[in-house]
Amino acid sequence: MLGEDGVETIVAISTPPGRGGIGIVRLSGPEAVRITGELVRMRGMLEHARARRAMVVDPRHRTATGGEAETIDEAMVTAFFAPHSYTGETVVEIAAHGSPVVLEAMVRAALEKGAEMGVAVRLARAGEFTQRAFLAGRLDLTQAEAVQDLIAAQTLDQARVAAQQMGGAMSQRVTPAKGELLHLIALLEAGMDFASGELDDVEMVPPAQIATAIEGVQEPLRELAASFRRGMLLRHGAAIALIGPPNAGKSSLFNRLLERERAIVTPLPGTTRDTVEESLALGGIPLRLIDTAGLREGREAKSTIDLAEQEGIARSREALADADLVLLIHDATQAMTAGEMELAAALAEPGLGRPHLVVENKTDLLEADARSDEDAGKDAGGRLRTSALTGAGMEELQSAILAKLGAAGSVAESGALNNLRQQEAVRETLAALAAAAAANDSGLPHEMILMDLHAALQALDSLTGATTPDDILERIFSTFCIGK
């Protein structure tokens, strides 16, 4: 039997798997309080947003004396009554000790008691609590997506931007443009209605006014579209590959950037036989740093290395192809080889190359007169100069990395686009507005302009979820963890 309005009550463990100080079982739906009464024993009634101490019981086992359900834990129980809850439904959270056995027992007991009582209680699907919050109008779609972003945040900047999105930063940024678009649609429709009726002296909206209004809608949306690269960089980070010949100091530089000894470093060339990956945060941006095997050239590449190093070199080339940024590491004490110059030229080739920085390492081994400009971080040719041993030039290298990635300054932009769904919604909106502007310039009837304006409005609504199809919603919320 379903609950009120045909809604099922859902239950799930809302804390991560494993043991911990606290574990939470969450219920949402019309039968949440009733089912909770079968899982715990407490004095008094639950009150909204007030925690109450309770004993967690096992309904399947009774004491030998009084026949009461046996106590298996202590807990704090908090109820949030509809509509003043996360999901808009009545929600109960049971915070017990973080024993997986106890938490799973509560979930099983909730399902069994629901079946005995003839009420619909089932396990929550991934992201279903947040999906119900969205469907109840407690969150728009960008706020719901931000919940997942906050959970997955690896840096404080990521968490800060996700919190802003949860607070409605995207909606606040879009609302003025949507208001102007609705106003323009209303003007055109009103003009058409009056012009087709008895009030023949009412003029249609002039083309110049329509063009100005469309431009007023487009401008903030263009700025929003331009935020996509920065938003994606903050959300997903970037991969940086350290590439170069053997013994150029790639692993030493890798360790220096990480500020710990992660890769093995020896004076012998070819120490790194495989790619070594590690994560770090730089300027609030999550980065994946990839140390690679040294690239040999000519006969040396075929005759003096074993199969393991050959495989490592092959993986180095794969890392180079997949990296968002390549650091080409060169030994400052040596002249650049033909192979290094060829690789640098290939990386710089317009349209085909990769974003890259040329880094001259081991400047500590240069003669004093050759490293007089070491403190500046770059030589006259624009190459970065560093010493992994002493740390010289590292600040300049870090700044150059952020600048090359487009993250100079702060990328924590409030209300920035940070996924492909959002970008596509804004792109479709701008395309429809451009079509409306073209129709207006061509002198087409207002009916045709309105078709494009309504298409723009529908695309803009899909950004916040007002017109998003069910299959897209399912795809979004399926990426959430169960219990959220």
Image: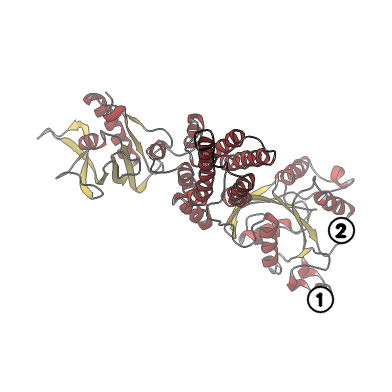
On the image, the x and y values in percent for residue 380 come to 83, 68
Q: Position of residue 460 (x, y in %)?
A: 54, 41
**What x and y, as percent, mark residue 290?**
67, 50
Q: Which residue is mark 1?
A: 368
Q: Amino acid at mark 1?
A: Ala
Badge 1 element: helix
- Vertically, is 404 above or below 34? below
Q: CA distance from mark 1 to mark 2?
A: 20 Å
Disc 2: which residue = 336
Helix, strand or loop at disc 2? Answer: loop
Is residue 477 shown left or right of residue 79?
Answer: right
Answer with mark 1 or mark 2, whichever residue precedes in sequence.
2
Image disc number at residue 443: none
Q: Is residue 334 left or right of residue 187?
A: right
Q: Nearer the viewer, residue 180 or 198?
A: 198
* Amino acid of disc 2: Met
Quarter occupied by the C terminus: top left
Numbered-mark total: 2
Q: Could you tell whether 67 is left or right of 174 in the image?
A: left
Q: Nearer the viewer, residue 35 or 207?
A: 207
> Who's the residue at 26% across and 30% down the image?
4
Q: Which residue is at the front of the view, 467 or 393?
A: 467
